[in-house]
Image: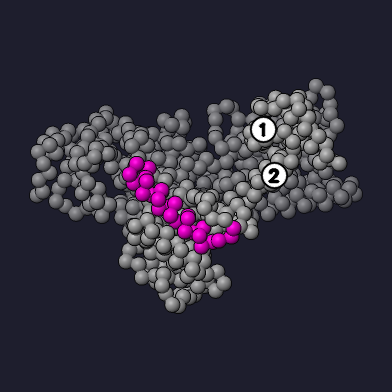
């Protein structure tokens, strides 16, 4: 049996037979795992026995240098403490839910005289009715639209009832509002309509359809055919909404269905939301490194974190599986958080079990799609970078790729752009611009030479001073251009007494890749991820350079126009631009406003006004 050292062996021997939490720490004292146990002595000792563990636990054990324990009175207390500790320490080997989305709900405050539908992302104990959650803003807007297609519900934010009746808006004219602002309906009539809205949102489409069909028949019998046709269209809208819902044969209470899929590496939890006997949507959560863990433990850990901040805890939670005794503990915890009855169940047969199977299928599908997306993403980023390195004959993987491009207009306002891709993805915080200082006219060769010299000179300076803006050097450099541009860029680094990194040029005409001193270019298939990565770097450098160059041109244009004003020198031009921000604002300013600008006097302000009036003619 492995000896863990005097400190750990003593702690292991003194573990109590008590419920509580334990915190595993690495050599740096960082908490790497938080767990709970009914019996701390048995659970913590199990980590230090020579028995088989899952790959994740084996990896975690290899980093343990110390541990702490916190005793609790009950299992539920340990459960809550574990959840709080995980949130506080965010340990690497625990399940960490990084999804912080707040799903939208529909809110109806029936205490208001003429209530309306509101979208909110937080449920509050304010006496209002909440419906949801809906998966995404589009879904909740579709529901609002469906409601307003059937019920003439007000959408404005006016305070009602009004002190004086107003003229109704267009919604009244087209039958989409009862116009309480104009006194077109009483509060009782609006309340009767709202009762239908509430039934509708609770999933009671049948009563709505029955009422609409009755109204249509009445209108048709009275030969009000246009009204009957409008009601017929509303009936079709309701029926269409019904078809989009998945009808369930369960009771009408709120339910969350939770299931898990694992692939040996990662896991995916799927939640399906049932409200009013109908499935209104679902969501899935990826759990990296949980693919080989006990499914019940994974689901229990997930539920703790998910419901800790959930906007709505349903009346019933149906779970695929949980550790022995955990359903009762979770039930007590959820009941305490909700303040009313909650049932946690693991259905083994019947209709509810069928629903869990449906959730498990959704979880497996989401995991498969995530893995496919991740495979494609890796192929286009790290995979493409690795393949590019092989093609270029590099000895190591090109983690950091820098791309350079020169932008100017007939040699004026020359700018060099440096973009950075790390692991095949843009690292925009690393981008830099260089104003070309030593080159006159359109000379891309000399401009590249200056840019690379300055980039590496900055790196050398930071190496001595400890800076970090330029200290991370590239593994690979892309130059927008052919052999000549590449030669100048490489020589710039050599002249500093440094060994250049791997470099290549990309000639745009035929997308030819040129290596230093090569006699022939490399041509890649346009469909390959490695060429597409090269093109992304080149295009990003071009885009970044053009944007900065245009900004400089715009400033130069403004500056040159102000130079025409007598008595307004460089200091006053700068002050005017700082104060007003644009030529238009300067032209529109009056004498008093102009004289308030730092450095301006009446004579200079008069010259600016004369210039502005001349421009207007």
> Distance of mark 2 from mark 1, alpha carbons?
13 Å
Residue 349 visible to the viewer? no
Task: List x then y, in percent, for residue 137.
Answer: 60, 45
Categorize mark 1 by other alpha carbons within 10 Å: few (<14), some (14-19), many (20+).
Answer: some
Task: List x then y, in percent, for residue 152.
Answer: 76, 40
Picture residue at 21% right of the left edge, 41% below the top: 27
- Mark 1 residue element: helix
Would residue 125 be found to the left or right of residue 194 on screen? left
From what the image shows, is residue 117 above or below residue 374? above
Work out whether residue 301 or residue 431 is closer to the camera in this orientation and state it: 431
Task: List x then y, in percent, for residue 93.
Answer: 30, 46
**Are the residues tagged 2 and 1 within 8 Å (C-beta)?**
no
Would residue 343 be found to the left or right of residue 248 on screen? left
Q: Which residues are magenta?
A: 441-467
Q: Earlier in the sequence, mark 2 or mark 1?
A: 2
Indicate whether residue 462 is drawn in magenta.
yes
Q: Which residue is mark 1?
A: 572
The image's mark for residue 245 is: none
Categorize mark 2 by other alpha carbons within 10 Å: few (<14), some (14-19), many (20+).
Answer: few
Work out whether residue 252 or residue 287 is closer to the camera in this orientation and state it: 287
From what the image shows, is residue 364 above or below residue 437? below
Return the residue found at the far right: 223
- Mark 2 residue element: helix
Picture residue at 34% right of the left edge, 46% below the top: 463
Picture residue at 35% right of the left edge, 35% below the top: 88
Q: Quadrant of the C terminus?
A: top right
Work out whether residue 411 or residue 374 is closer to the camera in this orientation and state it: 411
Q: Which residue is mark 2?
A: 560
């Amino acid at each position: 049996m492995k000896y863990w050292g005097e400190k750990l062996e003593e702690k292991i021997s003194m573990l109590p037979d008590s419920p509580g939490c334990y915190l595993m720490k690495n050599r740096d004292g960082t908490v790497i795992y938080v767990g709970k146990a009914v019996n701390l002595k048995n659970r913590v000792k199990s980590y230090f026995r020579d028995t088989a563990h899952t790959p994740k636990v084996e990896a975690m054990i290899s980093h343990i240098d110390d541990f702490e324990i916190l005793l609790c009175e009950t299992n539920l207390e340990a459960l809550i403490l574990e959840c709080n500790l995980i949130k506080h320490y965010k340990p690497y080997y625990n399940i960490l839910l990084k999804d912080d989305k707040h799903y939208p709900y529909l809110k109806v405050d029936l205490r208001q005289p003429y209530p309306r539908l509101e979208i909110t992302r937080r449920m509050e104990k304010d006496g209002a009715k909440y419906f949801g959650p809906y998966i995404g803003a589009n879904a909740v807007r579709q529901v609002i639209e469906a409601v307003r297609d059937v019920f003439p519900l007000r959408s404005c934010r006016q305070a009602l009832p009004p002190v004086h009746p107003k003229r109704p808006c267009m919604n009244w004219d087209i039958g989409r509002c009862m116009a309480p602002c104009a006194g077109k309906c009483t509060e009782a009539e609006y309340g009767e309509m709202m009762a239908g809205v509430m039934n509708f949102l609770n999933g009671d489409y049948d009563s709505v359809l029955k009422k609409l069909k009755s109204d249509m028949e009445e209108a048709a019998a009275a030969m009000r055919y246009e009204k009957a046709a409008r009601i017929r269209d509303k009936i079709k809208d309701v029926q269409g909404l019904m078809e989009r819902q998945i009808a369930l044969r369960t009771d009408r209470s709120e339910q969350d269905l939770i299931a898990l899929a694992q692939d040996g590496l990662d896991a995916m939890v799927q939640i399906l939301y049932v409200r009013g006997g109908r499935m209104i949507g679902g969501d899935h959560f990826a759990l990296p490194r949980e693919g080989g863990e006990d499914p019940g433990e994974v689901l229990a850990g997930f539920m703790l974190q998910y419901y800790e901040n959930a906007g709505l805890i349903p009346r019933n939670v149906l779970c695929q599986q949980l550790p022995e005794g955990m359903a009762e503990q979770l039930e007590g915890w959820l009941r305490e958080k909700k303040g009313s009855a909650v049932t946690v169940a693991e259905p083994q047969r019947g209709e509810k079990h069928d629903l869990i199977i449906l959730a498990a299928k959704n979880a497996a599908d989401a995991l498969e799609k995530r893995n496919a997306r991740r495979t494609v993403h890796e192929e286009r980023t790290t995979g493409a970078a690795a393949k590019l390195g092989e093609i270029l004959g590099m000895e190591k993987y090109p983690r950091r790729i820098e791309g350079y491009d020169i932008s100017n207009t007939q040699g004026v306002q020359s700018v060099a752009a440096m973009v950075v891709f790390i692991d095949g993805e843009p690292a925009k915080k690393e981008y830099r611009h260089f104003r070309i200082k030593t080159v006159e006219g359109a000379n891309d060769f000399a401009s590249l030479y200056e840019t690379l010299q300055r980039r590496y000179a900055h790196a050398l300076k930071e190496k001595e001073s400890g800076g970090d803006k330029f200290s991370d050097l590239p593994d690979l450099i892309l130059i927008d251009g052919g052999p000549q541009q590449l030669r100048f860029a490489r020589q710039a680094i050599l002249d500093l007494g440094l060994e250049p990194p791997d470099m290549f040029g990309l000639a745009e005409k035929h997308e030819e890749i040129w290596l230093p001193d090569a006699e022939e270019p490399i041509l890649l298939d346009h469909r390959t991820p490695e060429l597409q990565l090269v093109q992304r770097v080149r295009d990003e450098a071009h885009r970044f350079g053009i944007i900065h160059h245009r900004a400089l041109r715009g400033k130069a244009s403004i500056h040159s126009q102000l130079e025409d004003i007598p008595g307004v020198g460089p200091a006053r031009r700068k002050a005017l631009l700082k104060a007003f921000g644009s030529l238009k604002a300067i032209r529109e300013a009056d004498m008093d406003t102009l004289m308030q600008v730092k450095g301006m006097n009446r004579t200079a302000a008069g010259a600016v006004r004369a210039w502005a009036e001349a421009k207007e003619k």
